[in-house]
Amino acid sequence: MVAEGCYPYVVGGVSGWINSMIKAFPQHEFVILSIIADRSQSAKFAYELPENVVAVYESYLSDYDWGKKPKIGTRTHFSEKYYKALRSIIINKDPDWDNVFKLFEKDFSIDDLLMGADFLHIVQEFYESSYTQINFSDFLWTMRSIYLPLFLILKTPIPKADIYHCVATGYAGVLGGMAKSRYKCGLIVSEHGIYAREREEELIKATWVAGIYKNIWIEQFRKMAVLAYNKADAVTCLYGHARELQIELGCNESKIMITANGIDMARFANIPGKTEEDEQYVNIGAVLRVTPIKDVKTMIRAFAFAKQIMPNLKLWIMGPTDEDEQYANECFEMVEIMNLRDVVFTGRINVTDYLGRMDLTILTSISEGQPLTILEGYAAKKPVIATDVGNCAGLIYGEGDDQLGDAGILCHIMNTEELAEAMIDMAKYPEKRIKMGEVGYERCKAKYQLKQMQQTYKDLYNRIFKFNFPDRESELVAEVNEEN
């Protein structure tokens, strides 16, 4: 499993999906290759690793330069083949990744590469083609900052495996593509959100990068996405619109499978219900990480307005607050300054201890894929208020031949008024709320169970293994016999 910025260091979301996938296949050994910011995060796991995880390897986007240092007065100079390959990932839209991978197997210093003549000449050519209106020194240093993390990833030693499963494109996709090129193994790319599009949206809004450089960053992430798509044997996504975006970015549509998320509904079958104290409130549960992408501040503002109309509302914000401590503190201060009653920050929880006490759940994210927290709420027969991101509309209203009805209320992103009205509506009409919870439960049972997701990926793993290792098919037969 190749992951970036999530498992096993961060809980929830994609990390939870990876953990459930590993547990769903106890017959397989998993190795985690995880990309994190730097060594300060090393081994700070948020999960107790399942028994079938046999190793965790780390790759860093910012690190020391462990490469071979040049003699004084010299700089690394590559052959024409490798110079052209290096040039292709910076200037061309069709990079020669295979030769780039071979280049980075060589023993050289990344610092020496970035400060050397080859990189300078390539950047100079790129500059003269389109960017002469800005200062060259600034341009050169920006290009070094863009390519440093990629070059560190390309220098990562990759453990050998039969199948590499990348849980995004981006830097994880680069590692997967490099493994495919080097080992002729199986490669699956699974996207929960569309990584290249998410980075593009972040860069457009970002203040830390000057406008003229945004397109360079965006183009870089698109090149990395196309690499992952081209090298993959199969590409999965969670819903139809995500598939459309993958095709638009350059993925061959014949490779794409829509594989919905799945949860273990049995976990929520006999969870504790409301306490005597809870009965006086309409409890709204937000199971999330307290981070900007979850837009907790808009949730709090909307609750404040709704609370004025329905005083019996209570908001439970359930999840870790240590991922972005500054943002979490701003949320705490916001509640205090507004003198808001009945807002509870629980910190990290076992969701089954709390979800039965809720009357509904809420998710005010500005970006999502197919949120597991909505499905967990459905398994506990809780309707949802959610923003119109990712596949939230499909989860609430159904897709395809699904005629079950509404399982919640959909609102626009950062729309305080709509969210407040939805909270008031849920509180005013308990019969409607309960019916929505039943619809969510039936929808989850029909399409989003863990056993369904497990069977899909079991078939996919077996197909990719047989395709890449036809001479080892007897191993699959033995596995099936053992299960039987």
Image (spheres, grey):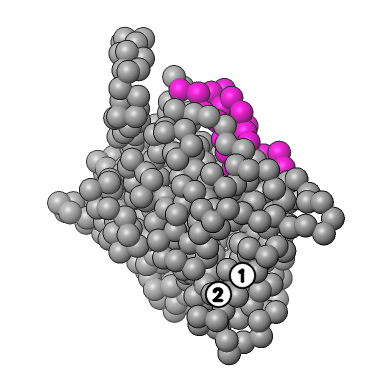
**Of the numbered discs in the image, which one, if any, rests on residue 125?**
2
Looking at the rendered structure, the kind of residue marked 1 is His
Separation of marks 1 and 2 at Cα, in angstroms: 6 Å
Residue at numbered disc 1? 121
State if disc 2 and disc 1 touch (CB < 8 Å).
yes
Residue under the point 72% across and 42% down: 42
Residue at the spot 70% in from the left edge and 79% down from the top edge? 137
* Extent of the magenta region: 28-57
Disc 2 is placed on an element classified as: helix
Q: Is mark 1 on a helix, strand or loop?
A: helix
At x 60%, y 42%, the residue is: 105
Identify whether 244 is placed above or below 401.
Answer: below
Residue, x 15% and y 51% (percent of image)? 401
Q: Can residue 85 be seen in this view?
A: yes
As rendered, which of 41 and 185 lies closer to the eye? 185
Whether residue 55 is in magenta: the answer is yes
